[in-house]
Amino acid sequence: MDIKLIVGLGNPGSQYEHTRHNAGFWFLDELAHAWGVSFQSQKKYHGQAARAERPQGDIWLLKPDTFMNLSGQSVAPLAQFYKIRPDQILVAHDELDIPCGQTRFKIGGGNGGHNGLKDIQARLGTPDFYRLRLGIGHPGDRNLVTSFVLGKPPAAERELIERAVAKSLAAMPLILEGSRDEAVRFLHGKQPGFD
């Protein structure tokens, strides 16, 4: 693993800021804060970007300004310009198929109907990028999915998602040093203080 670009998925605008679909943005904001970098608007990449100098080399952080279903319009230009391969990209996103507050880490696979992932796959031409999946739970009826992901979680759920974000931040050193199996064990297992 040689991560050069970390993308957080969400929708721009204050009306979406606290919605479940913006869990990827929440993670990236916390990561930028932890790394002491600030986002700047980058029109050519259709997003807010920050460049972090890390021991492993520079890593870009990107929050697309496009709406969720056009996320690839932001990810692909930055990746192409800096010659970042798909397997050097980590995308943090909300995940309906994982219980609220749990996290999963993987490379490749399907998009589970997630429009942000779908567009990134289409524009990169491959599904083979890393995913940090932040569980938000499922409303139980597919007809309720849109209003659920675009809704604000109640305080107890928000706290669970924030714990998942904190756990994900704690796993970043493992991810960045290429310890994929250890990162999976850490994120998928119960950890004191996080679960």
Image: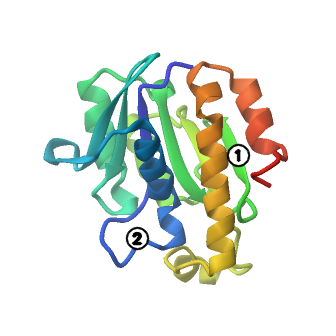
**Can the viewer see residue 60 in this picture?**
yes
Position of the N terminus, as image quadrant, is top right
Residue 120, placed above or below residue 100 = above
Measuring from the top left, give residue 25's x and y in whole percent: 44, 56
The label number, if any, that marks residue 31 in the structure image: none
Q: Which residue is mark 1?
A: 104
Q: Residue at x 39, y 61 (%)?
A: 68
**Which quadrant would residue 154 be assigned to in this image?**
bottom right
Camera-side residue of 96 and 172: 172
Q: Residue at x 47, y 64 (%)?
A: 22
**Which quadrant would residue 162 be assigned to in this image?**
bottom right
**Can the viewer see residue 118 in this picture?**
no
Query: Is 6 left or right of 97, judged from the image as shown?
Result: left
- As helix, strand or loop, the secondary structure at mark 1 comes to strand
Mark 2 Cα-neighbour bin, 10 Å: few <14, some 14–19, many ≥20: some
From the viewer's perspective, is the residue at label 1 or at label 2 nearer? 2
Q: CA distance from mark 1 to mark 2?
A: 23 Å
Mark 1 Cα-neighbour bin, 10 Å: few <14, some 14–19, many ≥20: many
The label number, if any, that marks residue 17 in the structure image: 2
Measuring from the top left, give residue 56's x and y in whole percent: 46, 16
Measuring from the top left, give residue 91's x and y in whole percent: 50, 43
